[in-house]
Amino acid sequence: MYFIKIGKTMKGLSVKKIVIALICILVAYGEIAGIYHSFNKHPKGDHLYSIFIPPWAWYRFAETWWHNDEECNDWNEKLKADTKNCLILFTQYGKGDTVEVNKAIKALKLQFNKYPNDKYDYVKNFCREYISYYRFSQKEFNQWLIKFFNDGNVHYQKSNELSTLESNISKYGVDELNRSMKHNDSLFVLLYYEYNRMKQQYRKAAPEGQKQFLEVIFRKDNINLQNIKMAYKNIFNEEIK
């Protein structure tokens, strides 16, 4: 009887330990999962609460069962509008009314700060990919222009890398941008005849004059790129090289 009692006691302790261990594992998992959910689906201010206040993380873990992204019924349309608004600010920065542009940037920042991380990153990634596209297309076109002025009637051919960059940003579904890229080739035909006329002036100039001639042409694109990068910095609070 004595050994039976000991066996029952040991068995009871073993079950108790297993239950306690399972509860500890569940709590630890819930906290980690809650922190992950907070970072992935809630504004930045929520992140610290989930890290330093465990019950908040547990609540966020439980909330994964009923979470509805920022009460937005159609994130696809909202994000499409956001990318379009960023594109408009990129084209207006340094050109449009400074007060109005800065007001629009401030409003956009406040809006983005309330977004879940995945939505915020979606808009930011679009902007980064657009800047990469703009910078590369500018560089490629300028290289062609130098060759065109110096070597004669050289036809422009888009590189595979530029085509890839165009394909990447076209996936965001910004209709105005997609139409612009689609009509770039026809626009280039018009520029071709204009640059063909300018080439005659270029060739008549001395080497120093030719250098200044190209600098004048490239200056506008360089200013545009710097304006776009500055607009990005003001919207997302980070530099882009």
Image (cartoon, rainbow, N blue to C red):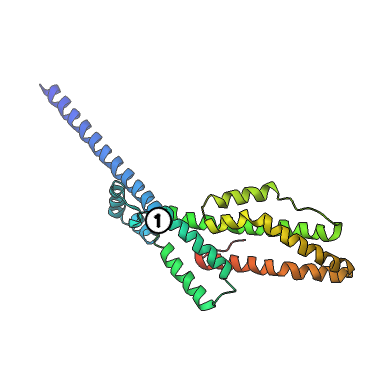
Question: x and y percent of residue 177 in the render?
Answer: 57, 58
Q: Determine the image quadrant of residue 205.
A: bottom right
Amino acid type shown at disc 1: Pro
Give the image location of residue 210, x and y in percent: 84, 68
Helix, strand or loop for disc 1: loop
Residue 194: quadrant of the picture: bottom right
Identified at 66% across, 56% down, the residue is: 184
Counting other residues with Cα less than 10 Å from the Cα at mark 1, is it few (<14), some (14-19), or many (20 or more)?
A: some
Judge whether 19 appears above or below 167 on screen. above
Q: Give the total of numbered labels.
A: 1
Q: Is residue 85 left or right of residue 129?
A: left
Between 179 and 77, the one nearer to me in the picture: 179
What x and y, as percent, mark residue 202?
Answer: 84, 67
Q: Nearer the viewer, residue 60 or 143?
A: 143
Residue 108 vs 173, above or below: the answer is below
x and y percentages locating residue 158 in the rendered image: 71, 50
Vertical order, 163 against 44 (above or below):
above
Task: Report whether residue 135 is seen.
Answer: yes
* Left or right: 233 in relation to 115: right
Q: Quadrant of the C terminus?
A: bottom right
Q: Is residue 233 visible?
A: no
The answer to whether residue 136 is left or right of residue 214 is left
Q: Quadrant of residue 1?
A: top left
Label 1 sits on residue: 116
